[in-house]
Image (cartoon, grey):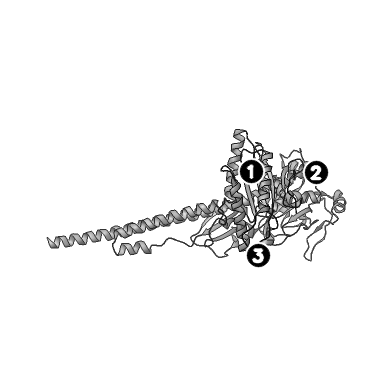
Amino acid sequence: MRRLRFWLGLAAVAAIGIGSLAAALIVHANDTADFHRMQRSEAIRSARQAEAVAGLSVGQLASVAAFFRAEGHFTRHEFEVIAAPLLQRGALSGTVFIQRVPHSRRAAFERTHRVPIFEPSPRGPKKAGERAEYFPIAYAVHKLQTQGPIGYDLAADPKRAPFLRRARDRGKPVATPPLNLLIGGLGINVYRPVYRDGAPTSTVAQRRSALIGFAAGAFLVNDLATAAISTVSDEVDVQLRTEGRSVAGSSEALDDAASARIHIADRIWLLVVRDPNRPGIGLPLLLAGIGISLAALLGALILVWSRNERMQELQRQASQDSLTGLKNRRRFEEDLRDEMARSRRDGRRGAVLMLDLDNFKTVNDTLGHPVGDRLIEEIANLLHARMRETDVLARLGGDEFGIVLPNCGEAEARGVAEAIATSVREHVSRGDGVPGITASVGISMFGDPHHSLETVISEADAAMYAAKDAGRDAVRVFDPQTIRASGSTSLDPK
């Protein structure tokens, strides 16, 4: 009997050990599968983030194209008013307008723009030779300055001319492969063709005849990579690839990584993500080795809890600004899209407010980023205290905030904006030596079924920059007739 109990005990121990080992192997297999699914999810989310930022910028080029198609010409000031706000959002580093110039109009172009049409050469720019038509850069705005390579004939540039012709013939935005940008740095150009208003464009021949130029944008590769990695932790390795080579991130092959495609115009990029935090089997094997099934079960529960916590943290990071706890740009656009759909369904109007702190860079430069971050938190709390439960408040990045006011008319939106601007101006920071701060606020109304999300945001941005141009510490409402913000305010601009 004792021997029987001995062998039964050994059998029970063996059963517990085998069961613990089997459980450990199952847990590890599930963890590995979950890890790969999460890594794939991270790659897809990052790719969508970069694609959304780039896609928004490419879409915004339509405003430049639409204006030229409707008006038939730009002044330099008009181009800067339309194009400069496009650089404040998304990943665009520069915006240009490329004009089609027949040979007969070459002299008129050079008189108007006060520059010759020139083309590249091994020793530097040279005057363009005689051809039937030219594609010089007529206007340019980029983040470093507002002067670009005006007059540069892209039709004579072998790296860019094929993509201009492809965009012209296809009638759709076309992206170049990575190349050295004219404004400096490695990046890509996206060309959007502009045709005469009302001209037929159903065939290639018709599109060639109707072409009047291109609205073009420049993306720095590093900016695209930054947009992609903004949704992942610092520990994750990210690589941006195109045409079989890495153009951003590690140049080495990332083993056991996940990848996702990024569509920019007609070109496909590949985002590769590798999370180094692979699940280990040390704890499950240790628990199986000592045969403590209860400890093994507890370890499995801890692993499950850890995975759930990680997933919750990733979800929070995807929708919340880490500094202020407010919603981030992605969540802001999702909520705005929902509210616009609700307004169209219910026949109500609403308002979008874009708020930017005036001269905030001076605070960072003189007092340091910790003081600037603390001031951003104070302004976020101040804005949050003034919001209704149904309002949407988000930090869009840096010192820029976005507000959605559902079921709100223009007069009420203006009143809210002026009250916010007054509160910001009267706010006294807790930090020693922090100067008073003011805000410029732009307002765009929505509810029109023909307005898109990009249009409403772009209009609010334009109104905000009009408030800054008016002297800052001001409120402006977007006026679609003049493509600039208009309205009165009781605030005294600086």
Which amino acid type corresponds to the residue marked 1 in the rendered image? Leu
For residue 90, the mark is none
Residue 340 percent coordinates (x, y): 61, 39
Q: Are marks 2 and 1 in contact (CB under 8 Å)?
A: no
Residue 409 percent coordinates (x, y): 66, 38
Disc with the residue nearer the chain's start (2 vs 1): 2
What is the C-alpha distance between the residues marked 1 and 3?
Answer: 37 Å
Indicate the secondary structure of the residue bearing disc 2: loop
Above or below: residue 348 compared with residue 144 = above
Indicate the secondary structure of the residue bearing disc 1: helix
Which residue bears the numbered disc 1? 453
In the image: residue 332, left or right of residue 418:
left
Q: Are marks 1 and 3 in contact (CB under 8 Å)?
A: no
Q: Residue at x 48, y 60 (%)?
A: 256
Which residue bears the numbered disc 2? 72
Q: Are marks 3 and 2 in contact (CB under 8 Å)?
A: no
Disc with the residue nearer the chain's start (1 vs 3): 3
